[in-house]
Image: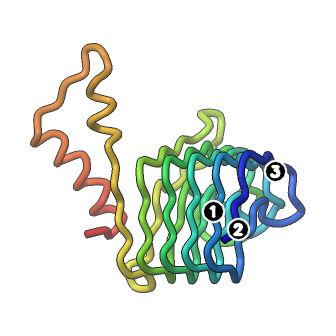
Amino acid sequence: DVIVEGIKFQNSNAAVVHIGAVDRIIIRRVSAYNAAPGNNHIFDVFLATNVLLEDCAATGSGRQMYDVFLSSNVTLRRCWGRWQSHSGGGGPNGYMQIYGSSDCLVENCIGTRDPSAGERIQGIIKDSHMSDRIYIFDTTLRDGEQSPGASMNMQEKLDRKSTRLNSSHTD
């Protein structure tokens, strides 16, 4: 097993943290900023198995803050991202993209967009024709409801969750 913990990566000439062709790696409490122009991501998981990204932060420029491609058994837990910009190359921009992958778990992750960014971005992008078994476990509606003055009944919670999941073609 390889464990990378408590490191800051920034201003790469490609993807900032590239996790490629590996098995059994843990990336914990790592922050990463500013990928190179083109089809480059902040955290890029490619051809990897048994990967855990936990308590990570991604921000700045890049096509995706978190990208998982052709990988299996990948868990993203409590990962935060703030998309700011991207200077061309690849498909849609967004917080997280999972495609060509299987048995992935997204757990309590939060994605935001810099309000000054002019373009629209995607939240979680999942290609339903290329990916198999992607699980999303999220308690943000429950946790957010504990804020003063916030209240939702069960149907409102389900409606909000199902609208987002349906738009990403997730069961």
The Cα atoms of the two marked residues, 2 and 1, are separated by 6 Å
Q: Earlier in the sequence, mark 3 or mark 2?
A: 2
Task: Give the residue number, with chain letter if any, for mark 1.
Answer: 26
Local secondary structure at mark 3? strand
Mark 2: which amino acid?
Val
Query: How far across and how far down the image is residue 31, in percent?
Result: 71, 46
What residue appears at the point 26 percent right and 28 percent down from the top-left corner? 145
Q: Pointer 3 and pointer 1: residues touching (CB < 8 Å)?
A: no
Callout in the foreground (3, 1): 1
Q: Pointer 2 and pointer 1: residues touching (CB < 8 Å)?
A: yes
* Quarter-of-image position of residue 2: bottom right
Q: Residues within 10 Å of mark 2 (few under 14, many from 20)?
A: few
Query: How far across and how far down the image is residue 71, in percent?
Result: 55, 80
Query: How far across and how far down the image is residue 74, in percent?
Result: 51, 70
Task: Give the residue number, with chain letter if any, for mark 3.
Answer: 9
Q: Earlier in the sequence, mark 3 or mark 1?
A: 3
Local secondary structure at mark 1? strand
Farthest residue to the top: give it.
148
* Quarter-of-image position of residue 117: top right
Vertical relation: 101 (above or below) 91: below
What residue appears at the point 83 percent right and 60 percent down from the top-left corner? 36
Query: How far across and how far down the image is residue 41, in percent?
Result: 70, 62
Mark 1: which amino acid?
Ile
Local secondary structure at mark 2? strand
Q: Residues within 10 Å of mark 1 (few under 14, many from 20)?
A: some
Task: Give the residue number, with chain letter if any, for mark 2.
Answer: 2
**Quadrant housing the N terminus:** bottom right
The Cα atoms of the two marked residues, 3 and 1, are separated by 16 Å
Q: Residues within 10 Å of mark 3 (few under 14, many from 20)?
A: some
